[in-house]
Image (cartoon, helix red, strand yellow):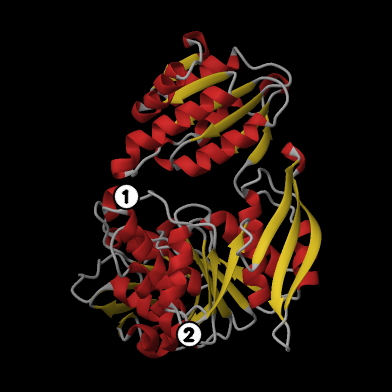
């Protein structure tokens, strides 16, 4: 755990100390980690009191201290409650969020880890997990926890850096406004960037696909000339980002115009994917050399090859040889998103409930099509698609009709999937509509049998992981 002195906090935030007790006694105080959750303010953490839309963190300062926090980052005008005990260090600032970000930038500048940042409409977290696993075979590596990828989460990740870390794999989300990634890059100073794709996720907020692409390109534009941009060359909008960076560019994908590509891709269902990795490199005499390596990737679905290629390109740019990269990819043991889970009555659940967009749902259905036994697709709303909402849900419905023996459509938008599947030829008796996860669980509990494969996928707002919890073997 990262440890900070009071001097570090004051210098990094530009705040002023309001001591509960003798200030001189607090000079030796150490903070073990930084948190915005009073419940996690244990073992001497620094609690940051953020003002949210519904909740003001200042109301939880006393609770954080009671849980073990040594101090808190608070607004200058916040009245200190009488019940706060002595020996607590309050660091007063104008804006706790801005101070958290300033502290993260200050700390990042003092840690020597090379930062690799990842963004894209889908596949960010999968790529982050794969890349961190590959790099960890050679380097001490920090990665973003969960989906801590925004103006709050990224600073918290950077504040977990230690002098021992050599690499930091940072997921960067953006989808609210232009300038977001430029700001995050100002905190993290990435030397390597990965852009997975550009799609209609967050289209409601950003307005057009072109603005989404411009938003993602900020990461590439922020790289130094000595850096490397690892770009999905099969996505035209991502490929075009080479024009906004001064860094070296490495294209990856399946097309033959990529520097790093996969050929002979064969999905083995739940046993993973086989493919040939092709690397095109320029020799000293400017000759173009292609190196080929056969790889068995223990991830699920043909689309996971893109995850592997992105991780391979970034890991090589970070200092690993191709031999080291290949060995690490074949040794991946953690499936990132598509998780096979033992289900009731001998069924198998394919848990991809974390999030959903049309491309990722179709890719998951492609995997389902390779499964033996009855194929059941449990598909829910895909949110924030804006003007692509209807088109995206209808496309998924048509593919579900081709693949699934039974479809469970969850939610208001999920109904569009089910209705389109029926129009595409799926018998009405094989489509079940539900607005509630509990009804889905009850329905499938009486239906699942040995050998069935059940795909569960929908946007995070539908909490479809609860369906998986209700159907898996305890």
- Residue at mark 2 to residue at mark 1: CA–CA distance: 29 Å
- Residue 48's quadrant in the figure? bottom left
Mark 1 falls on what kind of element? helix
If the image is split into quadrants, where does the C terminus sit?
top right
In the image, is residue 86 above or below residue 35?
below
Q: Which mark is residue 215?
A: none
Towards the viewer: 450 or 273: 273
SS for tag 2? loop
- Name the residue: 37% across, 59% down: 63
N-term mark: 2 or 1: 1
> Crowding at label 1, few (<14), some or many (≥20) Cα neighbours within 10 Å?
many
**Image coords of residue 349 (percent x, y):** 64, 31
Q: Is residue 117 left or right of residue 36?
A: right
Residue position marked by numbered label 2 in the rendering: 224
Name the residue carrying label 1: 203
Left or right, 160 with respect to 95, comes to: right
Q: Nearer the viewer, residue 275 or 94?
A: 275
Q: Write the residue at 28% across / 59% down.
A: 59
Q: Is residue 406 above or below residue 245?
A: above
């Amino acid at each position: 755990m990262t440890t900070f002195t009071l001097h570090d906090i004051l210098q990094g935030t530009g705040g002023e100390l309001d001591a509960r007790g003798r200030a001189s006694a607090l000079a030796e105080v150490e903070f073990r980690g930084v948190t915005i959750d009073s419940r996690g303010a244990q073992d001497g953490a620094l609690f940051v009191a953020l003002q949210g839309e519904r909740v003001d963190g200042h109301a939880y300062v006393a609770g954080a201290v009671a849980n073990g926090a040594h101090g808190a980052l608070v607004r200058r005008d916040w009245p200190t409650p009488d019940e706060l005990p002595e020996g607590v260090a309050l660091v007063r600032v104008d804006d706790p969020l801005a101070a958290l970000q300033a502290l993260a930038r200050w700390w990042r500048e003092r840690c020597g880890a090379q930062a690799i940042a990842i963004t894209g409409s889908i596949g960010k977290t999968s790529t982050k997990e794969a890349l961190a696993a590959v790099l960890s075979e050679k380097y001490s590596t920090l990665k973003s926890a969960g989906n801590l990828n925004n103006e709050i989460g990224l600073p918290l990740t950077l504040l977990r850096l230690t002098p021992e870390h050599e690499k930091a794999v940072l997921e960067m989300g953006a989808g609210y406004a232009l300038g977001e990634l430029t700001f995050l890059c100002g905190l993290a100073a990435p030397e390597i960037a990965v852009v997975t794709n550009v799609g209609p996720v967050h289209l409601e907020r950003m307005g057009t696909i072109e603005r989404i692409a411009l938003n993602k390109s900020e990461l590439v534009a922020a790289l130094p000339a000595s850096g490397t941009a690892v770009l999905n060359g099969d996505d035209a909008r991502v490929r075009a980002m080479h024009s906004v960076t001064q860094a070296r560019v490495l294209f990856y994908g399946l097309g033959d115009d990529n520097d790093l590509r996969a050929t002979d891709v064969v999905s083995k269902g739940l046993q993973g994917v086989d493919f040939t990795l092709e690397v095109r490199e320029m020799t000293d005499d400017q000759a173009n050399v292609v190196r080929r390596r056969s790889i068995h990737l223990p991830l699920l679905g043909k689309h996971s090859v893109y995850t592997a290629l992105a991780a391979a390109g970034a890991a090589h740019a970070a200092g690993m040889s191709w031999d080291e990269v290949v060995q690490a990819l074949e040794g991946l043991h953690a499936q990132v998103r598509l998780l096979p889970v033992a289900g009731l009555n001998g069924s198998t659940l394919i848990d991809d409930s974390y999030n959903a967009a049309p491309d990722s749902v179709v890719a998951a259905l492609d995997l389902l099509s390779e499964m033996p036994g009855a194929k059941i697709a449990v598909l829910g709303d895909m949110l924030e698609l804006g003007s692509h909402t209807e088109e995206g849900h209808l496309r998924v419905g048509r593919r579900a009709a081709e693949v699934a023996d039974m479809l469970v459509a969850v939610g208001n938008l999920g109904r569009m999937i089910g209705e389109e599947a029926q129009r595409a030829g799926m018998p009405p008796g094989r489509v079940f509509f539900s607005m509630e996860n509990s009804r889905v669980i009850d329905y499938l509990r009486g239906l699942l049998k040995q050998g069935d494969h059940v795909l569960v996928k929908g946007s995070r707002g539908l909490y479809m992981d609860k369906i998986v919890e209700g159907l898996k073997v305890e």
